[in-house]
Image (cartoon, rainbow, N blue to C red):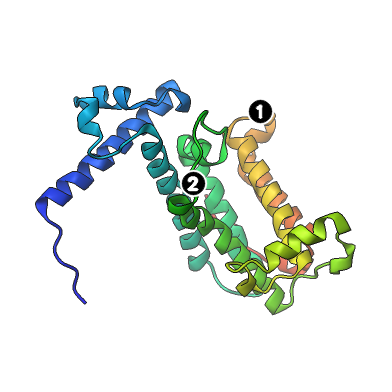
Amino acid sequence: MNQPPVSRRQRLHEATAEEIKAVARGLMAREGTSSLNLRAVAREMGMTASALYRYFPSRDAILTALITDAFDAVGEAVEKATIEAPMDGTCTRILAGVHAFRRWALEHPQEYGLIYGTPVPGYEAPADPTMDAAMRTNAVLLGELARALEMGFIRLPPDESIPESLRGMLHEMATHEQKAELGLPVAGWAVAMQFWVVLYGAINAEVFQQMPPMVLEHSADFFDHTMRRALAVMGVDQACIDAAASPAY
């Protein structure tokens, strides 16, 4: 079914909304995320604050739009890199995904900090407009874990090896309506969360320059080595890790 054509008024409204978001990103880059407010954005736009309300009713609405855009952008980058990598019996696809995540973070440090850095004081992201976007990257990486299990090149520890204090929480994750279709057992969710913590920590340390300068000089190789070691700890067959190709930079 053909969609009705977008009116000129709607196109202008959407273009102005995009310009407002671009101005907000610039302000946050110069003055910090916590300094964002409607008056400052309106001043940069040459608009009155009341005119800005037609596009975003509050500072929080602008932040929510920026956060959703950032999650969608990194999710799209990870999806594209993973899809374009060969689907073979190695870890090439998951390495393509995590390297795309790192590359996007380094190219967009302001947006990365907004979604994975220090929370904005007084702001709490609403679940409805941000959750689907936030899950895009996770969905790709979890899908690769599920594929590795299906292909038999990852060996998980028995669920009983997980501390009893964690099993209830992990079982709840495994049986959650949106996650149960992956078919990951409790131990699968344990290693998935461990891998995420290593991935997130490695990218954070580099984006926020919390690494020795000598390591930063070789950051791409160090990141690749770290991710390969994390895959080994997850139980991925070493031959599958060794045979995997890393993306060129």
Asked whether residue 105 is in view, the answer is yes
- Mark 2 Cα shell of 10 Å, populated few (<14), some (14-19), many (≥20): some
> Which residue corresponds to mark 2?
104
- Mark 1 Cα shell of 10 Å, populated few (<14), some (14-19), many (≥20): few
Image-based side of 69 in relation to 227, left or right: left
- Image coordinates of residue 104 in percent, x first then y, are 49, 46
Identified at 56% across, 41% down, the residue is 116
Q: Depth check: 203 or 37 in front? A: 37
User: In front of the other: label 1 or label 2?
Assistant: 2
* Amino acid type, callout 1: Pro
What separation in Å lies between label 1 and label 2 (alpha carbons)? Answer: 21 Å
Q: Is residue 192 above or below residue 73?
A: below
Looking at the image, the residue that sits furthest to the left is: 8
- Image coordinates of residue 231 in percent, x first then y, are 73, 59
* Amino acid type, callout 2: Trp
> Which residue corresponds to mark 1?
213
Q: Is residue 60 above or below residue 171?
A: above
- Element on which disc 1 rests: helix
Q: Is residue 153 above or below residue 220?
A: below
- Element on which disc 2 rests: helix
Asked whether residue 217 is in view, the answer is no
First in residue order: circle 1 vs circle 2: 2
Q: Depth check: 200 or 238 in front? A: 200
